[in-house]
Image (cartoon, rainbow, N blue to C red):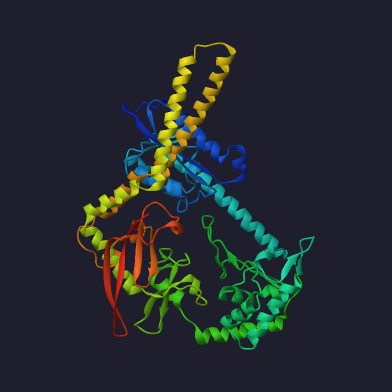
Amino acid sequence: MIELKEVINYKDLSLHEKKINVCAYARVSTSSDVQLLSFDTQVSTYTNEIMSHPDWNFLGVYADEGKSGTNTTKRVQFNLMIEAARNGLIDLIITKSISRFSRNTIDSIKLIQELKRKNVEVFFEKENISTFDPKIELIMSILSGMAEEESRSISENVKWGNTKRFEKGEFHVVTKRMLGYDHDEFGKLVINEQEASTVRKIYELFLDGFGATPIMKYLEERNIPTTFGNKQWNKTAVYGILKNEKYTGNALLQKTFRPSFKSKHTVNNKGELPQFYVVDSHPAIISLALFNKVQEIRKKKSIKYQKSNIKDMEETFGTKNTPYTGFVKCAHCGKHFNMKVNKNASSFANRFLQCLSNASKKTCVSDTLSCDVIDREIVNQINLIIKNKSTFINGLTKALNNDERLVIAKQELKATQAKLSLSETKLNEMISETDGFHKAVIDQLNKDIYEFKMQVADLQNKIMVDLNVENYLIRIKSLLKEYSLPINSIEEFPYKKFFSKLIVLERNKIIFVMGKRNDYENINLSQALYLSGLIPYRIRKTDYNAEHGIIFF
């Protein structure tokens, strides 16, 4: 094991003649971390340390709670911090340790190299290492590799333990997710007769020729709840019951697995790992013969009516995700739109977007949307921005600075700073007094001053981290910088990084949302659109115009 010698102490840094911009990054990922050093304590400690340094400008504490260190894709605050550093807003980042920064060795080294090229320093407290030290890449490779190997080892131990349990026929069922069963006082599966009757009825209806939609209708008309107590059913829940072998009293184990210790999602086990079939492991709700008969019917129906939407999407996009996944939001129910494909066997397949609420049956008033029309609206909106780049930036800047959250935070900061200044003035006026009364007043003033300083730090942190207008504008400008000519297709522009959402108000009116907020249920969709445009299209010899525009939110 390598012995680490003192390289640099960030408290003694004097590398810059002028004040440098300093922030900290904190992350808590386990319950033991919370017991040793709470999330809030980390944030307040870093705030005090940075604000007390005379040569530093406090740029906030970026903090993620309960996120994985093996990748950075879902660490929102971490990504905001790196983006600010890339845009020249940060000179020094302080963090507890290399493992808190990242456990992915390759990503860590690449990121450190990139930040060094931009003259951004990272200091790791536990290891007492600065990324400006010449030996940092070797040390980082060793230490980060050790942290990554620790994650790998834990994952492999868990996987090994699961396999050993499965070999013995031991498994656990979360009965809240499985209709028909409860756990008894000893933890064994027992039949919940009321729920089991629903399971048997679903199998009976399917054998009588009912598909998923008629079965859903039957259950809903009789107010029969799902396993989660919902009155509305969906096809996934119905088919999940029809293909679950555990209702026969037998259990197929290790049907899914995590392909890598870095992965947080499971995939179907197609022979990569051994599977175990446990016979008579618990009471049966239906017979094995009945279950097998249902599977034969399902297989025949699948062959006859099979639609290859997901297959088509994977072949086209290399993933189940489409260009619209997580981007197009319904104004009526708040759910997203997913892409569907009609006429899959035809070379003239029609792509359309459908609200998720209408996936099984129509429960939302929203209409389906043509992907071709949406694509044209995206392209047209981007071209309007490119054509009016200067006006657009001015409008965006004004809107961001007028964000009520930012305005209120600045007002609160100003008021708190005034209270702090008044308390400090009072303290200076009586600091020399030594009698008991004045001492009590002085003690209270010191407490008030400390509280006001923490409030000021919290508000400054909110303004500089969560509501940072400058950083957002720099990112938008950098995305636009490369474009001076109109684009011809959505593939030519990173529209998902540029717009935060596309909200469908109605088929012929969609809204592009820009800004730092994500509480879309509070957005005023009736306000005038910025840089609006129209797209003409035709359906069955009838001409329509689709309106689109921008809302800053």
Q: Is residue 532 left or right of residue 194?
A: left
- The image shows residue 300, relative to residue 219, as above or below, that is below
The count of marks equals 0
Image coordinates for residue 239, horizontal then vertical, percent: 59, 77
User: At x 43% / y 69%, what residue is drawn?
Assistant: 337
Residue 291 placement (x, y as % from top left): 67, 81
Picture quarter with the C terminus: bottom left
| Image quadrant containing the N terminus | top right
Q: Position of residue 551 (x, y in %)?
A: 34, 58
Q: Is residue 258 left or right of residue 516?
A: right
Residue 82 falls in image quadrant = top left
Name above or below for residue 320 compared with residue 8: below
Left or right, residue 474 beside residue 97: left
Q: Is residue 100 visible?
A: yes
Q: Quadrant of residue 136?
A: top left
Tell me the residue at 27%/71% (across/down).
535
Residue placed most toward the observer, 5 or 80 = 80
Camera-side residue of 515 and 253? 515
* In the rendered image, the vertical position of residue 357 relative to residue 207, given as above or below: above
Q: Residue at x 75, y 75 (%)?
A: 284
Query: Is residue 460 in sight in this rendering?
Result: no
Relative to 84, does residue 386 appear above or below in the rendering? below
Front-lying residue, 231 or 28: 231
x then y, percent, for residue 445: 52, 23
Q: Camera-side residue: 58 or 414?
A: 414
